[in-house]
Image (cartoon, coloured by chain):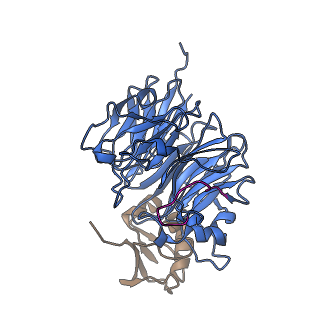
Amino acid sequence: MNSSPTRLVLMVATRKGAWLFHGDPGRDAWRVDGPHFLGHTISHVQLDPRDGRTLLAAAKTGHLGPTVFRSTDLGKTWKEARRPPAFDKPSNNLPARAVDHTFWLTPGHASERDTWYAGTSPQGLFRSDDGGDSWTPLPAVNDDPQFREWMGSAQDGTPDGPKLHSIIVDPRDPQHLLFGMSGGGVHESRDAGRSWKTLIEGMEVVEGFDAATVTFHDPHCVRISPANPDRLYQQNHCGIYRLDRPGTAWQRVGRHMPADVGDIGFPMVVHPRDADTAWVFPMDGTDVWPRTSPAGRPATYVTRDGGQTWQRLDQGLPQQQAWWTVKRQAMTADALPAPALYLGTTSGELWIGHDGGSHWANIARHLPEVYAVEVAELT
Amino acid sequence: MKVLVPSALRSYTGATQVDAVGDTLLALFADLDQRYPGLRFRVVDEQQQLRPNMRIFVNGQGVRDLGHALRPDDFVAIVLALSGG
């Protein structure tokens, strides 16, 4: 028997605050810690895996501007970032921009202690080298005329603002970065963000538009396989994709999803040790895009063969009249021997999918709309 | 001068009303940020614009121009715009 059983913490970011749920080693009992920042819109909470105790939370309120809160004691106390993500003065004759909210937080490479990346709305990429206390804009993205054309303006974005998201640091190489923009495509850097190349070949766009135009591409969530970092998965506005590097063409593996469910959704989760296993959470993307579970019957779908086949996993979830869905940061998996899935819903519920989503159990109800769920193991 | 602070910013000031100095609203917010680090960015964005849904009243008159000149005996109120439900 393990002498120091793993403890888990779930970091739940919602429209009205953040909560931490501390789990026992069996993942059966959860102790709630929260709300933190009640009334703040929290887009993301992340733990620094390099020290196991530093938390960052991306926050704003309905009226107040954006900021980042930082805790070095696992949420017991919080301190505001000295310099939250903020754009530079305008350059290259581009319009001035102001950060509306920080949307995405990614810890830096294991070898680069205290580095973090942040993605914002409107789309911007930022880096911190001091544990999230101060943030520097990356001009090769934020002030580049070509990127700005791809990003468009707030008028071109989704109702709650265009997002820069899915910031990925290759676990083998801190210089190798990826991110997605809704909209504006997937982009890759091999030099720590000084230069970028688009990575959109094979990705589809809404019917009638030109797939060669970067701005029309709307990746919702891009993930790298921890087991094989040459493999990427993507949930897109237009399907589910897989890309095996050094290849450059995404394959629409969502074509193998059931036709009556489709392959539209927000989150994408990859198994911690098996690059062929990944999960999605389909939503209704028909006519006006209800963004609900298809037919009011929520389910995850899993592939265990790299997207060639998909199986429905809904045991324990409501079987009818459940009109919620799951946003792009609100589904994740732990890295225990039999990984569990976790998801937070737009109706404020928190669920655990034991044994890779084979049977679901509710952890919490009546939370505000859940924006993000992350899980970490504490030692 | 006296500055009235909304409840949403009292985690910074600890008080409803504070003293600050400045010959313009921008200078006033710079002084407030010195005294209460982080406060300015919640109200004024990085392009020196008042954030949406925030309002400033100087002696009871609504002001949006942060270059607005101030006198030492002015009374400045920072207000969350009332709207919606």
For residue A31, which quarter of the picture?
top left
A306 and A281: which one is in front? Answer: A306
Q: Which chain is brown?
A: B
Left or right of A27? Residue B31 is right
Q: Is A260 positioned to the left or the right of B22 in the image?
A: left
Chain the render paints blue: A
Query: Could you say where residue A314 lies in the image, as x and y percent from the top left?
Result: 35, 34
Chief secondary structure of the magenta portion: loop
Which quarter of the picture shows residue A145? bottom right
Q: Residue drawn at (47%, 41%), measured in percent from left and top?
A: A256
Residue plotted at (73% across, 60% down): A195
Q: Is residue A379 above or below residue A289?
A: above
Instruction: Let me know if residue A200 is in the magenta part.
Output: yes
**Which residue sits furthest left?**
A321
- The percent position of residue A258, horizontal first and vertical second, equals 40, 41
- Image coordinates of residue B4 in percent, x first then y, are 40, 72
Query: Can see residue A159?
Result: yes
Q: Which of the image's four quarters has the C terminus of chain A? A: top right
Query: How many labels sit on residues?
Result: 0
Q: Nearer the viewer, residue A355 or A6?
A: A355
User: Of all residues shown, which one is farthest toward the right?
Assistant: A191
Identify whether A139 is placed above or below A2: below
Inspect the magenta stretch and tell me whether residue A281 lies in it: no
What residue appears at the point 25 percent right and 40 percent down from the top-left corner? A320
Q: Is residue A79 visible?
A: no
Query: x, y percentage for residue A210?
Result: 55, 66
Residue at 58% from the left image edge and 36% from the top image edge: A52
Region rendered in magenta? A198-210
In the picture provided, is A270 more to the left or to the right than A198?
left
Comparing A206 with A74, the one in front is A206
